[in-house]
Image: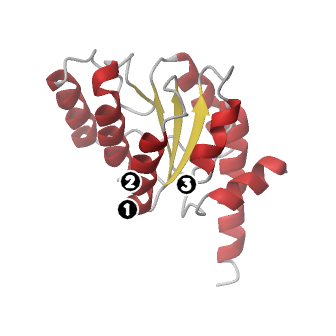
Amino acid sequence: MIDFAVACNYSRVPPGKRVGILVEAGGGAVAAADACENLGLTVPVFSSETQETIRKFMKEVKAPIPTTRNPVDLVWPPFGEFARIVTMTMELMARECDVILWITYYPLADEDMAGVLAKITEKAKVSLFAVPAYAVGQEQNLNIYARKGMPTFLRPETATKAIAALTQFAAYSSLDS
């Protein structure tokens, strides 16, 4: 219940149940996708156009070839290009989903990155939930993203429960309309 309250306090209510999952190493993607499916959320396969655009961009920046169907696994992108890769990928994902679940090894202490991602999610009208893949030492940084409207959780399963609760709230609220 507290997780739902956090999500309501810091996120927009998603219009649907489509979750895009973005990771930098595959294990979190499997856990997040399973958790989404178990809670009635959908993890749609991205269009071939979106997948191809991500692949081409990753090739241009000399990154490993990612898995692009959804979940999107960036396979340890080059740190020097990290912000550009993540923002471009999220912009593409936002076209085809209602919520982005980002499981990241990137340090959440970066205020500039949080600001850029907040602008992307605002422009695309999509919610972003961030989960540090390695939570030790990240706890104090979670509020940086939360203050910018992006709830953060220590585990993908907790984040997906909050996302599911928000989508149920949206469905219930639409009954009044």
Q: Residue at x 69, y 54 (%)?
A: 7
Residue at the image point whose x is 65% and y is 39% from the top: 142
Across and down, in percent, residue 56 comes to 17, 29
Residue 146 x, y percent position in the rendering: 62, 49
The amino acid type found where label 3 is placed reads Lys
Image quadrant for the C terminus? bottom right
The answer to whether marks 1 and 2 mark residues whose Cβ atoms lie closer than 8 Å is: yes
Residue at 65% of width from left, 49% of height from top? 163
Measure the alpha-carbon separation of dots 1 and 2: 5 Å
Taking the image as shown, residue 54 lies to the left or right of residue 157, namely: left
Instruction: Find the residue positioned furthest to the bottom.
Output: 177
Q: How many marks?
A: 3
- Residue that label 1 marks: 123
Label number found at residue 120: 2
Amino acid carrying mark 1 in the image: Lys
Residue 148 — which label? Answer: 3
In the image, 160 versus 83, the foreground residue is: 83
Residue 17 vs 69, above or below: the answer is: below
